Amino acid sequence: MTRSAEFDAFGPWVDRVHDATEVPGLYRDYPVDFVTSRLVLKVPRNISRRDALPTMDLYDHLIIAAPETLVVLSRANADTSGSPRGYTERTLGYGDVVAVTDTIDLVDGRLDILARTGETLTVPYNGSSQQVITRLVDVLSELTLAALRPTPAVIIPEADAPPADLDLLDLGKEDVGLVTSYFDVMRHELGATLLAAHGRSVLPPRGGLVSRAVHALYPMTLHGAVLCRTDRELHIVGRKGWLVRGNTPDLSRSHTSIPLAAIDEIVLAPHPTYLGASVVTMRLGAARIDLVLPEGSAAVQALVR
């Protein structure tokens, strides 16, 4: 079996690419400018080391934070096998980035980059590489904020009397993970302030007796969240989904950062299916982000005034 440096170095982690010699063979014909690019990463396929072969293309994505655009090269699969180069290319101008969400569920990571057109660029990754992905999110944040208009269309004011900082058990034992994630954000984002926080709750349905009886056995949980902000970004710490049925523990964590200048409008509506919940919709060009929050909560009041 013929070995290669790419095969010998292969593992589940996302690696930084420093020069052309470290570019995976599949993408080697793409002209990467390492002098001007802020960051270049290679994301491996989701296969175990024992299933990898030297003849395989072992990397699903090459991510290039170029000076003006984010470039993501992706290994062609059955749906894109017509690509003559064996990979597809997607580019996104930094001024078109309206939200970035980093989600971890045990070892499964996912980076979602939402564009003003409503399209989402998704990169799955192994959770062991979250530190590298955090670096990419930092670079995206810096370049996006530099490309956006300086004055936001919608003002999210800082609270006249900011809520007291969170203690570890303030959101309940089930949501200690959210509080520790919030601590991480506050350490990472200098000058960030807390807007609101709430733990999980069980929601009753708007339906009749049968629906309520079913929900008593198989309840709908509205997960907790922590909202904070910096001078130019809104940060939302929560789970991978707002509403989850059943009693299975949810250990996922997500962190969404939204440039304040990207928000065109914020709309409030009651949840159509469940009592005690509101849907706060952020409109960012053609894109939409729906937040499901407890009705009348501090989080709702912080966003809709």
Image: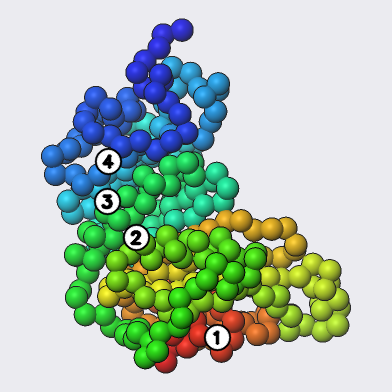
Q: Position of residue 172 (x, y in %)?
A: 63, 70
Amino acid on which disc 2 is placed: His
Q: Is residue 137 left or right of residue 290?
A: left
Residue shown at 56% from the left, 76% from the top: 198
CA–CA distance in space, label 2 to label 1: 26 Å
Q: Nearer the viewer, mark 3 or mark 1?
A: 1
Farthest residue, direction top: 1
Amino acid on which disc 4 is placed: Val
Q: Which mark is residue 186?
A: none
Q: Secondary structure at mark 1?
A: loop
Query: Which circle's residue, 2 or 1, is located before the other in the chain?
Result: 2
Q: Position of residue 40 (x, y in %)?
A: 27, 41
Provide the residue designation for mark 1: 297
In the rendered image of this protein, does residue 5 appear above or below residue 139?
above
Residue shown at 38% from the left, 66% from the top: 186
Frontmost residue, 206 versus 141: 141
CA–CA distance in space, label 1 to label 4: 41 Å
CA–CA distance in space, label 2 to label 4: 22 Å
Q: Nearer the viewer, mark 2 or mark 3?
A: 2
Q: Secondary structure at mark 4?
A: strand
Q: Which mark is residue 40?
A: 4
Q: Position of residue 231 (x, y in %)?
A: 27, 75
Where is the C terminus found, in terms of image quarters?
bottom left
Provide the residue designation for mark 2: 188
